Image: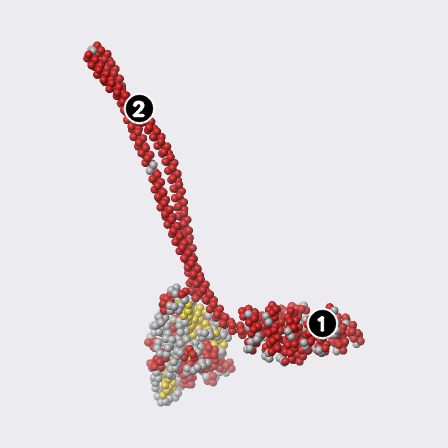
Amino acid sequence: MASRSSRQSYSHNHNNGSSSSSTSSSSSSSSSTAAASSRTTVGHAQPAHNSSGRPKPPSATSKRSVTLNSRTQSFHSDQEPGRVRVAIRLRPRNAEDLLSDADFSDCVELQPELKRLKLSKNNWSSESYRFDEIFTETASQKRVYEVVAKPVVESVLNGYNGTVMAYGQTGTGKTYTVGRLGKEDASERGIMVRALEDIIASTSPASDSVEVSYLQLYMESIQDLLAPEKTNIPINEDPKTGEVSLPGATVVRVQDLDHFLQLLQVGDANRHAANTKMNTESSRSHAILMVHIRRSVHEKVNDEINSQEKGTKSDLFDGNGIPIVRKSKLLIVDLAGSERIDKSGSEGLELEEAKFINLSLSSLGKCINALAENSSHIPTRDSKLTRLLRDSFGGSARTSLIVTIGPSARHHAETASTIMFGQRAMKIVNMVKLKEEFDYESLSRKLEGQVDHLTAEIERQQKLRDDDKYKLEKQLRECHDSFAEARKVLVTRSEILEKENIHLESEMKGILNELNHQKDLNNLMQDKVAKLEMSLKHSKQHQLENSTYQKVLADTTQMYEKKMAELIKQIEDERAHSESAEEQLALMKKLLSEHQNSIQGQKQIDELTLKLQEMYQLHENTLSELQSLKSENKDLLLQKAKLNEELHTVRQRLLEQEKQRKGIENELIKLKRAVPENENDFEDKKSYMKEELSKGSSEFGNRMGSYRSNPLRENISGQRATIAKICEEVGLQKILQLLTSEDSDVQVHAVKVVANLAAEDINQKRIVEEGGLDALLMLLRSSENTTILRVASGAVANLAMNEMNQALIMDKGGALLLAKTASKTEDPQTLRMVAGALANLCGNEKLLTVLKEDGGIKALLGMVRSGSSDVIAQVARGLANFAKCESRGVIQGHRIGRSLLIDDGALTWLIANSNTNSASTRRHVELALCHLAQNEDNAKDIISGGGVKVLIRISVESSREDIRNLAKKMLRLNPSLQADMHAR
Ligand SMILES: Nc1ncnc2c1ncn2[C@@H]1O[C@H](COP(=O)(O)OP(=O)(O)OP(=O)(O)O)[C@@H](O)[C@H]1O
């Protein structure tokens, strides 16, 4: 139930929808509609409104839109979005009604079409009431669900909290309406099952979660119906949001409807039911089903919100599709019966139950009255039920109430009060709020996923690039190799060609020379032939002229002709030779040109070079591509780093939020728990342990064992650890400053913390160094507060355990102050602390004289007046310490004279209390007497005080063997005591 301040700004008072008539039943239309319209104009949260661009609340689910009939819509009309809706359901007559109400007269008459109910007091008077819906006894479970609960369920699916509750007298059908499992007949299913059916159908297990807790509130104790051993579960109320939660309750994630049915069955089996006279199946507890829905909001919606709320969200989230979750809670409550105790005939435990039920229901009624009347105080804290339902009435949830009534006139009074309850509830207007938040967890998961994806992508690209690079380098190497090979081949070939060329050229030269020679010869022959022809001509002339010579001439001619033929043949041969030489030359030339052609290989080299250049270019390109990929890679890495940073920021925020929340919770708890209630126990045990340790008692080991396992000790060490942590966080200096605070409460807490710190050896030095001892002594000097005096004395006692501090305490007048404190208080706890402190100081041999002068011994002895065995035990311990130090001084030879204890009357007290019942006191008294007996100078007083007899008894009867032996030794070694013994 919301606080008055928040509610006032949203709600508006509403007229009662009832009208009464005396002789006839009138269906007065005192208009709740009119009132409702006035309510909606008063700045209501308007969840149905979509002007803000937010998803339209309660009327539609995002996954499965469920069509509502006109009656459903009017029940949850958008006109009054936050008002608590109330429906009446009339149970059919049962066998008992039929038996008891012989005349079948009903006290109620339903007018469902008018949404009115007439309640007849008697035959002549009735009252008419208007409700949001009226269900007759024939109304089906399905219709009841669809009208009353389904709109709430849809609203919850859209991110609003919702409550559906059944209220009514025992046996009127609350459990039937709300909790019926309907295992055999699905049409019988109640609201819980139907609600979960819809929720499961409208959510996706991949992105959403549906979790349930099932509890009962029985006799003001919340019990987990899914784990019945969990009882008394505390209620947690968020001081900021007012959200109510039960951190100790079992929360089960629902897998499917069968799973939920199983859970419900287990819960129902555990539900405590006691029979009453009115209904053998009566539920004596309030059953509460809590359904927590967490839904991821679609990206689109997210974008819409981002665009609507630009500037309000951090840049980090802009355009990134940050997941948003809607968390909502549905409460389905089956209240225990609202019958009157006297009428139910309850007795014994059932009477007690009924009282608790009445307590919770009546405080629910009070809250509803207060809310309906716009009261400034809503008494939500009166019962656990109202604390649990704090948010359901006047809070931020959408609430439907189904009021169940029976028809019988016998229950007129209960029915009337039930109806009035419903009427008042109708006036309450809630401030329905959408609860959306960034899903930092899934954002974190999403970012992690992105980072992983990017990392894998970078690695993949890097690998691809490495592969490409490797391939290109390989190709390049191969090109280089083939280029070098080709070059080598070309060089060899060109060398060979060169050589061949030179050879051919020289051969050609030779042929040319020969040809020229042949030509010359030819010319010569031609000249010769020409000359011969000339001579032949001349001869022929001579033949003519000289016939004698004709024959010779003929012979000569014949010879010359022969010779000419020979010469001609020779010329032709030469010609042929020349031709073959020319042919050879042509061949040579051809060969030469061929060779020259082969010189074109050079061109191939050039081409290859060109090709290589191209490949170089390609390589260059690849390199530049590599370069750009590298820079892309760099960008990706930068993006990754940015995402990591964002992830870190988000995690930090999550941690901070969590830390802040825990910090606030813990601070309170810490402050409450910081100081153990009974630190004295610890002190006792600690000094006891120290003492026992110093004696090396064998039985101490056993005791120590049991002490270690003592839960009190564990508790105290836990508290000590908490205090040490606080000290670490707050700082000792600040805590010590608080000792001087003007607020005595603060002083009390501070001195308790300091006392606890002082109990630990490791803290004592620091406390003294930082002025803690001065502050504690100041408190002893000035405070009148018993607690402060007690705890400060305890703290001084703790510090006085440390030998280094003992002289300081004495120097600063600690003994005087302790003595003064002892004289001004009668509080045994304080006296015990003071006695403990003085007893610790008594253990320092150097301080004995000053301690006595400052009145320490007198103060010790004075404190026995309290009669407290704890105080007396400390006194005895102090005297034993004192006597022991003295006897040590006597043995070492630097102390003479009788004991300082004797003047102050300690010996007399020791002798008188040597037979005390307290084992601890007795042991210390025995020890003190033994040590006093060590000093010959004390003998006279011991003898005169009757101490010899006591020492003899100690030597025989002491429970401790070492003390018996010590007493025997003293009696034997002290001559005066020996003499006295013999004289007896
Ligand atoms: N509308 C209904 N139709 C048929 N039977 C009904 C109807 N309402 C209640 N009953 C029957 O009446 C009996 C009492 O109902 P139920 O146990 O639900 O009452 P209740 O209000 O929850 O009682 P209690 O407060 O004691 O738990 C049951 O047997 C139930 O089946």
Q: Is residue 236 left or right of residue 494?
A: right
- Label 2 sits on what residue type? His
Residue found at the far top of this picture: 548
The residue that disc 1 covers is 886
Quadrant of res 64: bottom left
**Residue 832, how many percent across, how many down?**
64, 76
**Residue 259, how many percent across, how many down?**
43, 69
Secondary structure under tag 1 reads helix
Image quadrant in which the C terminus is located: bottom right
Q: How is the image coloured?
A: secondary structure
Secondary structure under tag 2 reads helix
Q: Inspect this view and state whether residue 944 appears.
A: yes
**Residue 317, how many percent across, how many down?**
40, 65
- Label 1 sits on what residue type? Glu
Q: Is residue 491 left or right of residue 734?
A: left
Foreground: 815 or 412? 815
- Residue density around tag 1, few if under 14, some if 14–19, many if 20 or more, within 10 Å: many
Residue 468's place in the image compared with 449, above or below, is above
The residue that disc 2 covers is 517
